[in-house]
Image (spheres, rainbow, N blue to C red):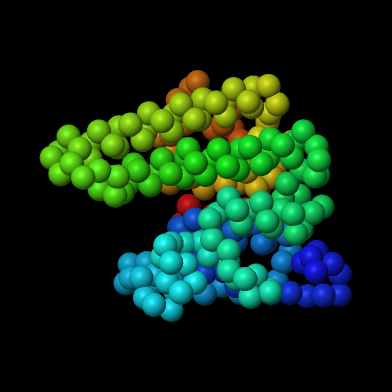
Amino acid sequence: MSANKENHPMTYTLYTSAGSGSFVVEAALTMAGAEFTKIDIDMESGTHREAEFAALNPMKQLPALALPSGEVMTESAAILIYLAQEFAGKGLAPEAGTAEQARFLRWAVFISANLYEGVLRYYFTQRYTTDETPAGPAGVKAAAQNNMRTACAVLEADLARNGPWLSGPGMTLVDVYFTMLHSWNPGMADTSAMSKLNAMVEAVRADAVIAPILGRHGL
């Protein structure tokens, strides 16, 4: 039964760490008005590598979301798409079957593949090369930043045609998703040529629902 049915309260469990990708899932659940609890995972002490959490997510990464059914979801883009479907009408995504929803789905996957992965390559370069000379990690980092700026230019161009939001007349989860990644690496869109993206980020950051969650996550 869908979680947006009345008279059937269901509780989600979000495995989270401040400043991690779990921010955007917490934002989605809050926007939806969903009942959820949070379990803090101490990344610095290595809690995410312990057997209990690894059983939930073998990749030992956040976010992880336990659904009311007991099913565990990982991968932030997949979680956002799922929650947008479960809480239709709550403003998480455009209406199903519309051109705006098509953009929502496109940009959710695009952001995950090009920007989330790019941030990881930028900050965790050793994961992406076996070249231990200084040129190895440096090259990975430079390529990641260049690729992210290319991806941001694609988003900027779309905003020029369809803006001020990425998937409709109002803020949706893809705008919040981008804002999280931008907060991790502002340089990905830190040019005057990307003024529309930066304006969108400022609007998300000023949102009355999102702003407190950003603050709690130190973003």
Outermost right residue: 6
Residue nearest the observer in this picture, 43 or 112: 112
Residue nearest the observer in this picture, 219 or 110: 110
Is 165 placed left or right of 50 in the picture? right
**Do we see residue 140 in this rendering?**
yes
Outermost left residue: 133
Is 65 placed left or right of 46 in the picture? right
**Do we see residue 212 in this rendering?**
no
9 over 172 or under it: above or below: below
The x and y percentages for residue 50 are: 36, 75
**What residue is rendered at 43% in x and 33% in y?**
148
111 over 67 or under it: above or below: above
The quarter of the picture where the N terminus appears is bottom right
The x and y percentages for residue 173 are: 65, 47
31 over 125 or under it: above or below: below
**What residue is rendered at 54% in x and 33% in y?**
198
**What residue is rendered at 35% in x and 43% in y?**
121
